[in-house]
Image (spheres, rainbow, N blue to C red):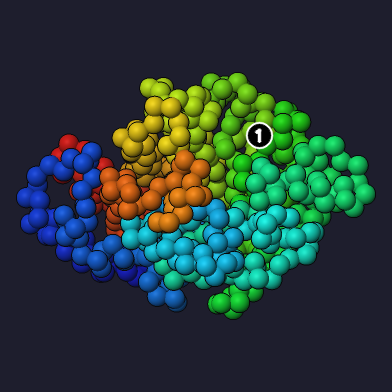
Amino acid sequence: MEPLNGFFPLCVISFLIFLTTLTQTLSLTALDDTEYEDWESYLNIPNTILTYGSEMEDAEWQMVQKKGNQFVVNGQPFYVNGFNTYWMMVFAADESTRGKVTDVFKHASSVGMSVCRTWAFNDGQWRALQKSPSLYDEEVFKALDFVVSEAKKYRIRLILSLVNNWESYGGKAQYVKWGNAAGLNLTSDDDFFSHPTLIGYYKDHVKTVLNRVNTFTNITYKEDPTIFSWELMNEPRCTSDSSGDKLQEWIQEMAFYVKSVDPKHLVEIGLEGFYGPSTPQRLQFNPNTFAQQVGTDFIRNHQVLGVDFASVHIYPDSWISQSVGDSHIPFVKSWMESHIEDAEKYLGMPVVFGEFGVSAKDPGYNSTYRDTLINTVYKTILNSTKKGGSGAGSLLWQFFPDGTDYMDDGYAIVLSKAPSTSSMISLQSTRLALFNSLCSERCHWGCNKKKVLQKLLYQEDEL
């Protein structure tokens, strides 16, 4: 194993302290992975180990980069345990709800979450960021500034999505409305992907957001390491062109454009992960036959120059059947494994499972099933990390603080109301933090710590 860019002594010392503490505390007794007790406290892991590599000083708060099929920060791997809270900017725009943004980051930080995905758009709606093309509400922009600055306080990085495929928060439909109001004769929301005027509207929005100077930190967004990556669109689909050509051309143009404005940050598309016409042999992994007709093409789309990592979502209750069923969990596992394999063999990049969850409104739902689904996602990520694979992390949909039940779409997780889920999240964060801290990105589990770390982080039956 190579030294960690000058940090080798601290790594070794931390590791020896950890092993001593571990053996004294456990005496090599078994740890049941299914019980999810307060794992860090039970093991009495020194905080120096869990915080090592977590950029505690501003000078060390560096950009996340991609190296092969891994994310790295300061030369160390950066595996992600994170969450979605899409409404942060809108809540921050109102003083009466701004505190909920702080609560989200505080609670997420308490269970070790490191990345949040949220919207950097609200087009033509209530509390719109972009009221009309290139016309912005400065107070709402200041609210987004607050979200970014507050994330940094809690050492949580942000994936910022730039537009919606769906009508919520405006989306591509709002761009088409703006185009028609300007005298265009547009007949499909998918004209968003091809009409020069709408493409110009989108590029202007991208340029405005990326060049924004944060009023709280005085840091330009495109220079801020708090931002993990830019997402071109939330769940793009182009059902008017099942060949995928129209969306492919849009991705190519926009990925290049974002990189031309901001070459420092990572870029991802925001796809759900459906396989398309370019890979007929992979269509068997799609959740249904409709998935191959929505104009997306997972492998082809992610081979675009300027796209740094792959994005996949996981919703068996939306794609297979709303009723919770026995087929859902095997689907989750095979869906993830197929995309991790593709990211390794064909794309050479990390893959992040950017949304996953189950709705409490589903027939047959119970909290045990939700924990089983989350556990399946987490274990699949861990199985990839122990091989040095492309499974780079996952983001729960979605994470809420107390007092926001009226916003719940059925998928919300409130830690105070879900102790077993909270412990599971914390355990995953701890495992990934330990791996991030104790190995360099060149280790790939070939170092002397491999056997001990495998037992500590992955083995279910004994430690």
User: Which picture quadrant has residue 76?
Assistant: bottom left
Quadrant location, the C terminus: top left
SS class of the residue under badge 1? loop
Residue that extends furthest to the right in the rendered view of this protein: 183
Crowd class of label 1 (few under 14; some 14 to 19; many from 20; radius 10 Å): many
Q: Residue at x 64, y 66 (%)?
A: 140
Residue nearest the observer in this picture, 310 or 149: 149
Q: Position of residue 201 (x, y in %)?
A: 79, 55
Left or right? Give the position of 343 relative to 448.
right
Left or right? Give the position of 140 relative to 200.
left
Q: Is residue 162 above or below residue 370?
A: below
Q: Is residue 338 visible?
A: no
Q: Is residue 321 above or below residue 360?
A: above
Q: Position of residue 200 (x, y in %)?
A: 81, 55
At label 1, which amino acid type do we have?
Thr
Quadrant location, the N terminus: bottom left
User: Which picture quadrant has residue 223?
Assistant: bottom right
Q: Is residue 204 above or below residue 309?
A: below
- The count of marks equals 1
Residue nearest the observer in this picture, 357 or 379: 357
Q: Residue at x 34, y 58 (%)?
A: 112
Q: Position of residue 41 (x, y in %)?
A: 19, 58
Residue nearest the observer in this picture, 449 or 84: 84
Q: Residue at x 62, y 58 (%)?
A: 120
The residue indicated by pointer 1 is: 296
Q: Is residue 191 visible?
A: yes
Residue nearest the observer in this picture, 289 or 107: 107
Q: Residue at x 16, y 43 (%)?
A: 31
Q: Position of residue 444 (x, y in %)?
A: 36, 48
Left or right? Give the position of 259 relative to 71.
right
